[in-house]
Each structure stands twice: as structure tokens, then as C-alpha cells.
Amino acid sequence: MTPSSEVIIDAGMFWLVGISILILYLWSTINILKEHERGVVFRLGRLLPEAMGPGLVFIFWPVYRMVRVSLRTVTLEVPPQDIISRDNVSLKVNAIIYFRVMNAPRAIVEVENFSTQPRSSLKRPRAPCSARLIWTIC
């Protein structure tokens, strides 16, 4: 091999590696959102006004970041609790809480730890919350 053929081979390998990295990067930008999901997109940390709908979404990684949000209704069963009413009647109360995202960008921006929030709120006793409850008395 002559020195000029080694330079050509090295330059060819350089271009081959560069093109393969570019193809892998472009492949990683493709995201597929299901019908019940929305993608909340941030551009350099700033929220884009509209959530991306279902289908193919292209997110170019260093500039854009996407958070997936499910729009399905989540049911959460509150464990049965014994209570005593004002007239000293002992009751057992069950509850089911329904959560549904109506505005995906607002849910991500205004609720800290959105994906784990409904389950973690029942671990400690709290004051009555503003969630809609369906009460059944046994």
C-alpha cells in the first residue's frame, strides 16, 4: 500500500463513521405517540404552547425535550376508613377518586411529580382535597 491509499481509506472510514452517527441521531428523533397520549414539548426549557398530538413526532434532542402524558382516566381506591359522625354513629367509608388530564401542558408545568402524584397523596393523612370523590357508605 502506498501512503496516499492509506489516507483515502482513513478518510473513507471517517465519513462512514460520521454518516452512521448522523443516521442513528436522526433515527432517535422519531417518537410515536399513541392515541391516548400527548407530548408536552419544551424548547430550551421553555414550554411550547400546544401539546403534540398522536402520531409521529420529531424531537431534536439537545434543543427539545418531550414529556409523555396519558389522557386516560386513572381510578384510585381510597382504603376503607372508620369514622364517627356528630351523633356518635360509627360508619365505614370507602371512596374512589377519578383523575383525568384535561390540559396536558398545564398538568406538567403546574403539578410537581405529576406522574406519581395521585398515588403518593394517599400515603399521609391530609385535609379534604378538591378532587371529585364518589362516597359509598357501608
Image (cartoon, rainbow, N blue to C red):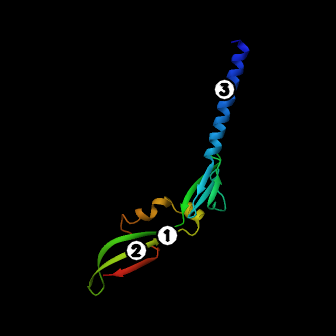
Q: Is residue 92 left or right of residue 49?
A: left
Compared to residue 38, the image places residue 26 above or below, namely above
Instruction: Tell me which label, 2 or 1, sits earlier in the chain.
Output: 1
Residue sitting at x 62%, y 52%: 45
Residue farthest to the right, as pictured: 4
Residue sitting at x 64%, y 35%: 20
Which type of secondary structure does the marked residue at label 1 adopt? loop
Instruction: Name the amino acid, label 1.
Output: Thr
Q: Is residue 122 left or right of residue 82?
A: right
In the picture of the structure, the residue carrying the numbered disc 1 is 73
The reply to whether residue 46 is in sight is no
Instruction: Tell me which label, 3 or 2, sits earlier in the chain.
Output: 3
Which type of secondary structure does the marked residue at label 2 adopt? strand
Residue 123 screen position, x and y as percent: 36, 63
Q: Is residue 41 left or right of residue 115?
A: right
Instruction: Name the amino acid, label 2.
Output: Ile
Within-10-Å neighbours for mark 1: few <14, some 14–19, many 20+ = few
Front residue of 20/61: it is 20
* Rendering quarter of residue 133: bottom left
Instruction: Name the amino acid, label 3.
Output: Met
Q: Nearer the viewer, mark 3 or mark 1?
A: 3
Residue sitting at x 30%, y 74%: 81
**Gap between marks 3 and 1, in whole Å?**
52 Å
In the picture of the structure, the residue carrying the numbered disc 3 is 13
Compared to residue 91, the image places residue 44 above or below, namely above
Residue 118 screen position, x and y as percent: 44, 65
The reply to whether residue 3 is in sight is yes
The circle on residue 11 is none
**Gap between marks 3 and 2, in whole Å?**
62 Å
In the picture of the structure, the residue carrying the numbered disc 2 is 96
**Gap between marks 2 and 1, in whole Å?**
12 Å
